[in-house]
Image (cartoon, helix red, strand yellow):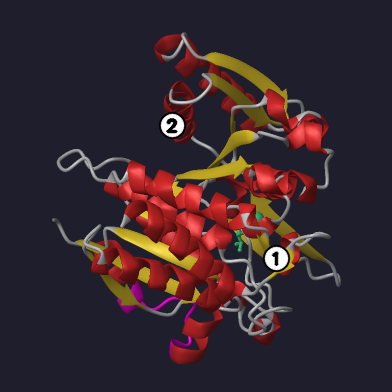
């Protein structure tokens, strides 16, 4: 069995406690002979700032470049509110995304049957929901230059961020969207703001061109991003794959997360282009939720988004689709047993902490896979 190298970057807040549950799962898989994972661990975010004075060290970046996949927890917290902007915890995550060139961020929003009542929407609107937000992750206003606050000298300042997209960036994310749609319900909805933004005009036209040229057999619709946000909470099941830029994708994926009951449920995978020689993609796996400093250390964090992100790693980096399915089923089984972390708790279910939820998922996984 080939050995796979994983770099774990637990980060801050609830990152380390949720990552602990993934570590236990990795140990289980190694012991059961299901995989041969070799893990390394390093700091990112505030933890890296405290250790090295930078949001990620050069050494950790080198480990990330050398790994077969990177698992990321969460970064940030009030403790680092005053650190210089360039070294704020989020800068570590943004550098990882940019330097690893993981431009395609897959954020699936799936409603587990047991949780349909935890959604902020009525059960019939979300029951069976299975949509995928594909967020462009290495371009747009997150990275565009200039990005600065200028002093205008008359006691006025001017803040500038730059929204910028080149044709090739839109083409490659559009191709990922159409390829993913083909494995699902064959529909892509592209969201931008072409009614106000030049980048939206180009986004629309390039997605349209790629569709006509290469994917005419996939259904494509265009939606303005504000209307898309409205449709997501009005009738989310109309969507299959939503493809959108970095900033709209950030916002729309938080909206989609709440449809599933809690931010604590949503995993993500960030993939680069396949290497021409080996076919391997750089990959970074991270839950959509943040570091939740308010509950960090209380043992109450929901580990499901982190565990499901590891499931995406099995699927997309290691071709272990069956084990990924088994892991998803194990998560559903723990929920069916009525176990709930506080974020998804409702009357008649049993409130458990991070460890108990993690252990129940491992038990269900072991029963099926090992
Ligand atoms: C996300 C987060 C990040 C983002 C932050 C932590 C920089 O909100 O992954 O959605 O804005 O991309
Ligand atoms: Mg976000």
Residue depicted at 32% across the width and 71% down the height: 27
In this view, the mark in front (1 or 2): 2
Residue closer to the observer: 173 or 139: 173
Q: Characterize the local packing of mark 2: few (<14), some (14-19) or many (20 or more) Cα atoms within 10 angstroms.
A: some
Q: Considering only vertical position in the picture, is 111 above or below 353?
A: above
Residue closer to the observer: 265 or 233: 265
20 relative position to 226: left or right: left
Q: Quadrant of ligand 1?
A: bottom right
As helix, strand or loop, the secondary structure at mark 1 comes to: strand
Where does the image place residue 304, in percent across and percent down from the top left?
56, 60
- Kindly identify which residue carries mark 1: 149
Residue depicted at 62% across the width and 75% down the height: 76
- Kindly identify which residue carries mark 2: 176
Span colored in magenta: 52-60
Residue depicted at 67% across the width and 72% down the height: 352
Residue depicted at 47% across the width and 81% down the height: 54
Q: Is residue 33 visible?
A: yes
């Amino acid at each position: 069995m080939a050995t796979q190298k994983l770099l774990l970057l637990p980060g801050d807040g609830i990152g380390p406690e949720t990552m602990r549950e993934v570590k236990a799962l990795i140990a289980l898989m190694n012991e059961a002979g299901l995989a041969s994972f070799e893990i390394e661990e390093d700091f990112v975010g505030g933890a890296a700032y405290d250790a090295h004075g930078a949001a990620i060290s050069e050494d950790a970046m080198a480990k990330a470049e050398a790994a077969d996949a990177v698992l990321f927890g969460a970064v940030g917290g009030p403790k680092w509110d005053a650190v210089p902007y360039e070294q704020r915890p989020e800068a570590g995550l943004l550098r990882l995304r940019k330097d690893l060139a993981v431009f395609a961020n897959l954020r699936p929003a799936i409603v587990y049957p047991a949780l349909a009542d935890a959604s902020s929407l009525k059960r019939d609107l979300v029951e069976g929901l299975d949509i995928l937000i594909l967020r462009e992750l290495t371009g747009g206003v997150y990275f565009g230059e200039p990005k600065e606050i200028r002093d205008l000298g008359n006691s006025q300042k001017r803040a500038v961020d730059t929204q910028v997209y080149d044709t090739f960036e839109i083409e490659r994310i559009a191709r990922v969207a159409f390829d993913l749609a083909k494995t699902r319900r064959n529909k892509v909805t592209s969201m931008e703001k072409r009614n106000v933004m030049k980048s939206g005009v180009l986004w629309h036209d390039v997605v349209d061109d790629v569709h006509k040229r290469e994917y005419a057999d996939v259904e494509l619709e265009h939606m303005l991003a504000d209307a898309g946000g409205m449709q997501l909470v009005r009738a989310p099941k109309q969507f299959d794959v939503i493809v959108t830029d970095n900033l709209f994708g950030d916002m729309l994926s938080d909206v989609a997360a709440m449809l599933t009951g809690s931010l604590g449920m949503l995993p993500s995978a960030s993939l680069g282009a396949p290497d021409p020689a080996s076919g391997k993609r750089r990959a970074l796996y991270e839950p959509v939720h943040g570091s939740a400093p308010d509950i960090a250390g209380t043992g109450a964090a929901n580990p499901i988004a982190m565990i499901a992100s590891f499931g995406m790693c099995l699927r997309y980096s290691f071709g272990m689709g069956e084990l990924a399915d088994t892991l998803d089923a194990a998560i559903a089984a723990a929920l069916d047993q009525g176990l709930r972390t506080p974020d998804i708790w409702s009357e008649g279910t049993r409130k458990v902490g991070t460890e108990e939820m993690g252990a129940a998922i491992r038990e269900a996984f072991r029963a099926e896979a090992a």
